[in-house]
């Protein structure tokens, strides 16, 4: 079989946060993140669908949401759950089963911060488009451009 090795930046590899960081989130907020849930209800069984650089944003966001979630749950008797956390168009996207205006404001602030934070390492970054839109620092933009992909 003849194989061609080429530089491709239009097809990123399936990237995911490291398992130890995911586990830290699952253990700290088990009431929100259900990695064993039915895929028809939650996408958290796929894990956090972004790289490690946004972990600190998520950790701070989750801490900020604690009092808001507790108030909401106490007032309504309904349980908040995070259904999916992913990268889309270079930004952090978090889908929840229920939200309030205050929770939506915190989610938006985290998303805006992600547009300025390298998804790979957490250093300052900017949105870049090379077939896919990603938020990366200069170092990781250069690494992506040189990343060899095997073509068949």
Image: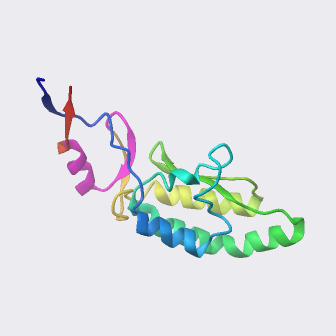
The answer to which image quadrant residue 60 occupies is bottom right
- Indicate the position of residue 36 as horizontal and vertical percent values: 60, 57
Residue for point 21% across, 50% down: 143
Magenta range is 130-145
The answer to which image quadrant residue 1 occupies is top left
Residue for point 74% across, 62% down: 80
Residue for point 54% across, 55% down: 111
- Quadrant (top left/top right/bottom left/bottom right) for the C terminus: top left
Residue 74 lies left or right of residue 130; in this view the side is right
Residue for point 64% across, 54% down: 37
Residue 7 lies left or right of residue 31; in this view the side is left
Q: Is 31 covered by the magenta stretch?
A: no
Say which of 119 and 12 sits in front. 12
Q: Is residue 52 above or below residue 29?
A: above
Q: Is 133 covered by the magenta stretch?
A: yes
Say which of 147 and 122 sits in front. 147
Residue 152 lies left or right of residue 66; in this view the side is left
- Indicate the position of residue 98 as horizontal and vertical percent values: 76, 55
Say which of 135 and 27 sits in front. 27
- Indicate the position of residue 132 as horizontal and vertical percent values: 38, 37
Q: Is residue 142 above or below residue 79?
A: above
């Amino acid at each position: 079989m003849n194989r061609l090795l080429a530089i491709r930046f239009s097809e990123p590899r399936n990237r995911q946060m490291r398992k130890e960081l995911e586990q830290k989130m699952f253990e700290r907020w088990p009431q929100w993140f259900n990695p064993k849930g039915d895929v028809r209800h939650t996408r958290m069984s796929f894990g956090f669908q972004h790289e490690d650089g946004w972990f600190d944003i998520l950790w701070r966001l989750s801490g900020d949401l604690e009092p808001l979630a507790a108030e909401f749950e106490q007032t309504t008797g309904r349980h908040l759950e995070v259904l999916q956390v992913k990268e889309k168009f270079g930004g952090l996207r978090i889908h929840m089963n229920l939200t309030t205006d205050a929770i939506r404001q915190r989610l938006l602030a985290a998303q805006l911060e992600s547009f300025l934070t390298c998804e790979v390492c957490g250093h300052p970054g900017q949105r870049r488009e090379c077939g896919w839109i990603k938020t990366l620092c200069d170092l990781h933009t250069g690494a992506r451009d040189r990343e060899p992909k095997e073509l068949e």
